[in-house]
Amino acid sequence: MAYTSPGETRKKIYDFVRDRILGGMPPTTREVQRAFGFRAVQSARQHLEKLVVDGKLAKTGGRSRSYRLPEFGKASPPQLIAMLGRVQAGELTEAMEDPPEYIMVQTRFDGDELFALAVEGESMLHAGILPGDIVIVRRQPTANTGDIVVALVGDEATVKRYRERDGRVELHPENEAFSPIIPREDGAPFSLLGKVIEVRRTVE
């Protein structure tokens, strides 16, 4: 591999390990060795241990995939949750069930309570939810006025702001180009899939 300073190499190793941890599969020391072309596994181990000393990584003893991000150490451990498909943030569209994928989250909620969906459409722009964002959703059948929810109307799903007015449920967009959805006006079955508790965005 081309020469880089120890500091530059260590930064690249940190980025590599971090991406693998967030992807749900922390690398072993030998995987780091192979990824960076070190002749000896000890070279990879020394870089990893220096990252631990610097506080950028933490290590759990007795495991081959022992490195983790230190911010995970003071709270609940990271969990993998199902990425179920896509949900429209615009006009209602048929819910899509893609082949299962998983993403990592860290939250006080149990992973069995959670699922993730990728957002399509622009009706929630002013709530900071953009096309391509991923919403982390806690399964629950009820919500409070003002919550952002994923709702099912008939066989179609959408993400909207939940409101109750005059005894009826309204699903409001956060974009003046779209109109509220009033479930049950046409007799279609309505249910809440859950409340949005986190929004994620990839910038590259």
Image (spheres, rainbow, N blue to C red):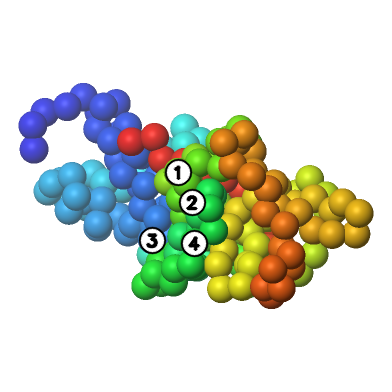
* Amino acid type shown at disc 2: Val
Q: Which mark is residue 131?
A: 1
Q: Position of residue 161 (x, y in %)?
A: 70, 47
Judged from the image, the secondary structure of the residue bearing numbered disc 1 is: loop
Alpha-carbon distance for marks 4 and 3? 34 Å
Q: Which residue does the image show at 72% across and 57% down from the upper left?
A: 182
Side of 42 relative to 145 (left or right):
left
Residue designated by label 3: 25
Alpha-carbon distance for marks 4 and 2? 11 Å
> Residue farthest to the right?
166
Label 4 or label 2, whichever lies nearer to me, is 4
Residue designated by label 2: 119
* Amino acid type shown at disc 4: Thr
Give whichever of discs 1 and 2 has the lower sequence position.
Answer: 2
Instruction: Name the one closer to the observer, 204 or 126.
Output: 126
Residue designated by label 4: 93
